[in-house]
Amino acid sequence: MSGRGRLALCAFTATLLAAGSMLPLVDPTGWILQAAVLLAIQSGVGALARRVPLPRLLIVAAQFLVTLVLLTAVFAREQAVVGFLPGPEAVRHLAELLRAGADDVGQYAIPAPATAGIRLMLVGGVLLIGLAVDTLAVTFRSAAPAGLPLLALYSVAAGLSGGGGAGWLWFLLAACGYLLLLLAEGRDRISQWGRVFGGAGRSPSGAAAGLDVSGGRALAPVRTGRRIGALALGIAVAVPAALPALDGGFLAGTGSGNGKGRGGGTISAVNPLVSLQNNLNQPENREVMSYRTNSRNPQDFYLRILALDQFNGSEWRASRRSLKDVPKRIPGPDGLSPDVAVTEIRSNISSSRSYQQSYLPLPYPATEVKIGGHWRYEPAGRTLVGDRGQTTSGARYEVSSLVVQPTADQLAAAPDAPSEMLREYTKVPGSLPEVVKKTADRLTKGAANNYERAVKLQNYFASEGGFSYDTTVTSGTGSAAIGRFLKEKRGFCVHYSFTMAAMARTLGIPARVAVGFTPGTVQSNGAVSVGLRDAHAWPELYFEGVGWTRFEPTPTRGNAPGYTRQDAPSGSAADPSLPEQGASAAPSAAPSASESCPAQLRKQGDCGNAAASAAAGPTDSGTPTSTVVWVALAALVVVTLPLLPMVWRVRVRKRRLASSAGRTPADVTARTLAAWLEIIDSAWDHGVEPDDSQTPRKTAARVVRLGQLDTEAAAAVHRVAGAVEQVLYAPQPLAGAGFAEDVQTVRNSLRISADRFSRIRAVVAPRSAIRVMDALAERRSAVGGRWAARWGGWLRWPSRQQS
């Protein structure tokens, strides 16, 4: 194989290995096979264009156009011109798929379903990275910069998965692909020097042999390159593992720990606000979970995912925390005094299979969780986090939690929080606009304590400040977004909770933002359904003696806690030993389904099971037969199309060399000319182009010379050439025999004298297959002649000379 061929193969391999880091992000993983086939076609187009040869920019343009055609044929066939050309409708459809894919990425947890939009993003991304790698490493022969797009591909996977999806194994595979590319480029550059440096060995005479002219010795620079690459890779793997300070490094995952031992692992929370606004704007309130509880105040039953306790000026996010094994009984919440009334309740929660979240939604504060699977516990936020890929999909669990019932007097009399709590939870960035602090001071002027300040802030946003609830507002989470929200007074729960928490911090009140779901909607069967539109964010403020306390500043969402209302009666819970009448101590078999759920979601099983008295059989008839047929035909075309030249060539050779029993002069002529044409085409397949202007004898000499045939093959070529002269010019041509053996002898000699690439091309992509185009042209002309002879008088247009 030539140097460029090796580079192209290594570039293809490196891209595919780097793309493997994205496999854990999507389920199922069949998209990688589709990407591999399209990437192979893209690389093949580049190889053919370089062999023409074309200018470099034209090579890149040709590959890009082929990539666009391939994506159009796969993802926008119905909108494309003649099924594969990217017209305006196809481009518009691809843009819509990309937009839908971006929405899906924000909506689904890992592993996300392989929707059409996500598959387009994955396959298209791999093809673009592959084009960049092929352009840099092969077309421009600069393999070192090709590592940047490969790193970008891995970094995207690591960023989307938070480090858990693109682990150390995928990084090693991507790195090995890059090292392979570097070695191939080094070997190609060394081979172009003419003489290969063989190291400081010594010749048999004892003189230093710095140049190895034999070409058979191993290349010292290649060995050195392998050693350096292996050493660098080993350092990259070993150092982060050896140094505790680097456990969050490039190879270290930032997921939910390894689940081994006690207190091991850390968590760097993925910000769930990415999909919150999208969930609120869904056209259908698709159910994500249902629950039953024995609480007498279900309107206060908020399901909390996690708390965002760090505000750096650009976003609110969760701190990096240590994980522990889930205790059998979770300790009481920090800061809760025995003087505050609490009631323990029990709840049974069932999550939809379509809801895949690494954090387990829980009522706050939970005291005991019974659930199967791999989960870890984060004490500061009192959250459960999935370990080793564990998600909430299809989870069913039982939770015991506390209903904390402080009075207004207890909150008002709360002492100052501990200094550590104040230091961590009252930090505000320097970028926070001054209007936030000034507004907070103005609203709370005259308040006697932090409780009164908090209630004034809540009432200002919820009812007194003239704010409007609007989910279409751009959801910024930084300092600028807070300042804009105070000015425009329009936003949704993210803006209200973030702004109130920031204001509380400027007043010296420890504050954070919780993300989760509001209580949901009670169903006819007694269960409570929680949908996508119930996604919510709310502030939590800390009061010593009570702990973290929920407030509700968002108008028309959730409900204000009783301890913030002057005339609200205190709630209570039912006997925790028994569920409330009509409730079940066990979760329902599956969440109840909404009647308005679209048919497509029902097919995917994302709506849950409708309540029915008897189990019904599956109603999904599966993929339509027409779709299966079209997909099978398309796959057949993709697989067989590149093989058509080889199949045609084998068929033609077999027909030419088939023995004929005829002894007539016509049979002898046909048999001899077929053998001669097969020799010419075999030589053409191996790089010896035919020259129709020469005689058979000169053509034979040319084939022998250019094809570097051995003595036996040369004699066979001249023997067939002599027979051709006999049948063409002799009055009575002699009947020849053994031409099939002569042709085979010539083909064997041509194969032996050719290099590896020429041998492979002669079989897979024979040059003589171009004759099929000539045959089609002749057949088209013949058909056209017959058509004109029969119908020409009826269809002929009048000439310009006719008046």
Image (tube, rainbow, N blue to C red):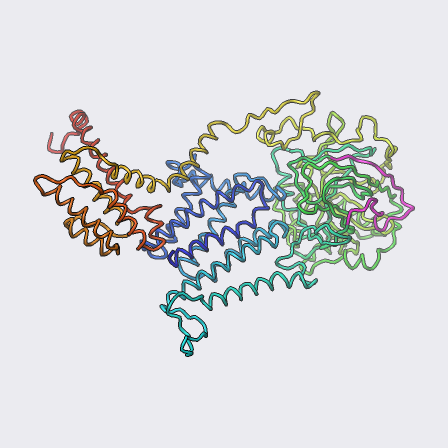
Residue beneath the point at 84% across and 57% down: 418
Say above or below: 422 vs 615. Answer: below
Residue reaching furthest to the left? 731
Residue 465 visible in the shown view: no
Q: Is residue 531 left or right of residue 77?
A: right
Whether residue 553 appears in magenta in the rendering, the answer is no
Q: Is residue 318 left or right of residue 203?
A: right
Residue beneath the point at 46% across and 52% down: 12
Residue reaching furthest to the right? 339
Q: Nearer the viewer, residue 315 or 369?
A: 369
Q: Give the image location of residue 636, x and y in percent.
A: 42, 36
Q: Quadrant of residue 278?
A: top right
Residue 770 visible in the shown view: yes
Q: Nearer the viewer, residue 252 or 574?
A: 252
Q: Give the image location of residue 208, x and y in percent.
A: 42, 78
Q: Quadrant of residue 621?
A: top right
Q: Main secondary structure of the magenta part?
A: loop
Q: Nearer the viewer, residue 605 or 649?
A: 649
Q: Quadrant of the N terminus?
A: bottom left
Q: Give the image location of residue 764, x and y in percent.
A: 35, 45
Residue reaching furthest to the top? 613
Whether residue 339 appears in magenta in the rendering, the answer is yes
Disc count in the image?
A: 0
Q: Give the image location of residue 361, x and y in percent.
A: 73, 41
Say above or below: 771 vs 181. Answer: above
Q: Is residue 615 left or right of residue 686?
A: right
Residue beneath the point at 42% across and 54% down: 8
Say above or below: 43 vs 27. Answer: below
Say above or below: 729 vs 784. Answer: below
In magenta, the rendered stretch is 325-349
Q: Nearer the viewer, residue 760 or 442?
A: 760
Q: Quadrant of the C terminus?
A: top left
